[in-house]
Image (cartoon, grey):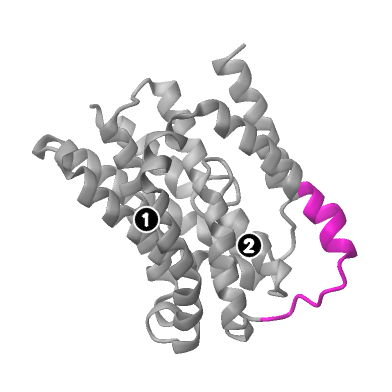
Amino acid sequence: MENIYAIIYGVVEGITEFLPISSTGHLMLVTQLLGNDSSFIKSFEIIIQLGAILAIIALYPKRLLADKQTILRVSAAFIPTALLGLLFYKIIKTYLLASVPLVLVTLFLGGVIIIWFEKFWLNKKEVKREKTVNDLPIAHAAYLGLIQCIAFIPGVSRSAATIFGGMFFGLSRKEAVEFSFFLAVPTMAAATGLDLIKNYQTFSVDDVSFLVIGFVTSFVVALLAVKWLTRFVASNDFTYFGIYRMGIAILGYFLFFY
């Protein structure tokens, strides 16, 4: 497979992983466009998430490796995700990651929900969103892990689920975004590890350069995307992402089904 494809996948993964627009959904659409659908590509799409994980560790080393309160809350949120991920792994990999129509529907509906949250629910809900991650009760962190599981459905967006879930529990917009970053680390590391264990036989020595290029590309692009998002949320809401999701879903419909 040509290495330019690895770069394309790495760029898409790096940009979309931490934005509330669904990296899995976008990678599935890219695969459909490139005509590369295979067991190897499905695993590759998961494994290059490691590059994005390292970007978060590189940007927040103290919070992730030395802040006991942050580690405790991330761990509490990760437990339900890990348990349910193991339980539904086969269904997710076999059926959900193969349905482009499902992705287009969830991208569109997710966009509608984001706009509704921003324009109606968040403006009317009388909740002070001033909590930091370390102010979050452990039980609420665990609930956020359950909320994140909605993103097992491709196109939903793990980051959108955790960001809006965090704001629901009173986190400030910035802290909700950062908690989404932190929770992504064990979640994606576990998903990658599980997929490697179950599908290592789909890889060969010839695939190493392809994997490395995708990995490095996703790392570099994710660094830039995370820095941009943290600046963006300081003075903007997520309405633009909702509009984008609806637009890409409509475009996908005309590309694949019209």
* Label of residue 163 in the image: 2
Closest to the observer, 40 or 247: 40
Using the image, determine if residue 124 lies above or below residue 120. below
* Label of residue 86 in the image: 1
**What's the magenta region?**
115-131
Residue at 36% x, 41% y: name it.
45
In the image, residue 120 lies in the stretch drawn in magenta: yes
Closest to the observer, 228 or 203: 203
Closest to the observer, 72 or 17: 72
- Tell me the quarter of the picture where residue 129 sits: bottom right
Task: Give coordinates of residue 190: x percent, y percent.
Answer: 34, 60
Q: Measure the C-alpha gap from mark 1 to mark 2.
A: 23 Å
Residue at 59% x, 45% y: name it.
156
Closest to the observer, 252 or 9: 252
Q: Is residue 29 left or right of residue 160?
A: left
Q: Is residue 145 left or right of residue 67?
A: right
Q: Secondary structure at mark 2?
A: helix
Which residue is outermost to the left? 205
Which amino acid, by three-letter code, is at mark 2? Ile
If you read the primary sequence from the N terminus, does the residue marked by circle 1 or circle 2 appear first?
Answer: 1
Mark 2 crowd level (few <14, some 14–19, many ≥20, 10 Å Cα): many
Residue at 74% x, 57% y: name it.
237
Task: Give coordinates of residue 254: x percent, y percent.
Answer: 62, 16
Task: Give coordinates of residue 125: x percent, y percent.
Answer: 86, 67
Q: Secondary structure at mark 1?
A: helix
Residue 236 shows in the view: yes
- Quadrant of the image for the C terminus? top right
Of badges 1 and 2, nearer the viewer stands 1
Task: Give coordinates of residue 42: x percent, y percent.
Answer: 34, 36
